[in-house]
Amino acid sequence: MPGSADVPSLQELRSRALAAAAPRRYGADAAIACDRVVKIFTADRVEVQALQGLDLTVDRGDLVALVGASGSGKSTLLNILAGLDAPTAGSARVDGRDLLAMSAKERLRYRREVVGFVWQQTARNLLPFLTAEQNVALPMQLRGERSTPAATRRRRQRTAELLEALDIGELAHRRPAELSGGQQQRVAIAVALANQPAVLLADEPTGELDTDTAA
């Protein structure tokens, strides 16, 4: 028979019961949870509601596409989830982080470590004076990890793995101007994945992936 050490105490049983009975937070286990999100823009003293009480949950591992007419709020929502903008009302959480409660410093760290973002415009994704591999390595360097030979090797290995996975390993030493639009977007995807983000966001990232002629 199991010893007394295997039998939970009355206090432990009470704690488990209270935890099971407690109300669960909306989207508690989701990668993304938006609850009645509102975003209002003001221009020339005219208010425009880009988002009107949006509810959304995305589970970990899910692949979700946002489809809608131009001006329906798709990019607004992505900017909020990326930490580039804040909702006017409601709540938004990504990987357990409350996007409304972040300080400016926390928001910067969130963008570096928690989410990856790929812009539709290729020019916004890459620094033109860096090579493909340097662009991919940059987010890892910005995390603030102490520069050691071991850290440098890890960054190089991660960079090479991502570029090979996207079938552009041979372009590692080219700058963006020497790449086609599609090749630039592949590098941008590698940049967004460099720090192994919990969530990858992309604003129409594949529009140029059919232009893979050599630059």
Image (cartoon, rainbow, N blue to C red):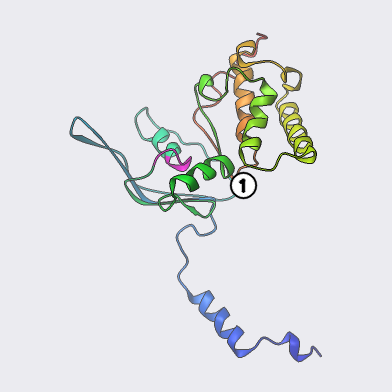
**Of helix, strand and loop, which mostly describes the magenta segment?**
loop
Magenta-drawn segment: 80-85
Please tell me whether residue 53 is drawn above or below residue 20 in the rendered image: above
The image shows a total of numbered marks equal to: 1
Please tell me whether residue 204 is drawn above or below residue 150 in the rendered image: above
Quarter of the figure with the N terminus: bottom right
Quarter of the figure with the C terminus: top right
Q: Residue furthest front?
A: 147
Q: Residue furthest left?
A: 45
Q: Residue furthest right?
A: 1
Q: Measured from the top left, where is residue 212 in percent x and y?
A: 64, 14
Q: Is residue 121 magenta?
A: no
User: Front-most of 54 and 172?
Assistant: 172
Q: Residue at 53% x, 75% y: name it.
A: 20
Horizontally, residue 48 falls left or right of residue 91, namely left
- Among the 4 quarters of the image, the one containing residue 74: top left
Q: Residue at 50% x, 42% y: name it.
A: 108
Q: Which residue in the protein does label 1 denote?
A: 61
Horizontally, residue 33 falls left or right of residue 13, namely left
What crowding class fits label 1: few (fewer than 14 Cα within 10 Å), some (14-19), or many (20 or more)?
Answer: few
Q: Measured from the top left, where is residue 161 in percent x and y?
A: 76, 32
What is the secondary structure assignment of the residue under circle 1? loop
Please tell me whether residue 100 is drawn above or below residue 163 in the rendered image: below
Horizontally, residue 96 falls left or right of residue 165, namely left
Q: Residue at 42% x, 53% y: name it.
A: 101
Q: Measured from the top left, where is residue 2 in percent x and y?
A: 79, 88
> Label 1 sits on what residue type?
Gly
Q: Residue at 75% x, 91% y: name it.
A: 4
Q: Is residue 82 magenta?
A: yes
Horizontally, residue 170 falls left or right of residue 125, namely right
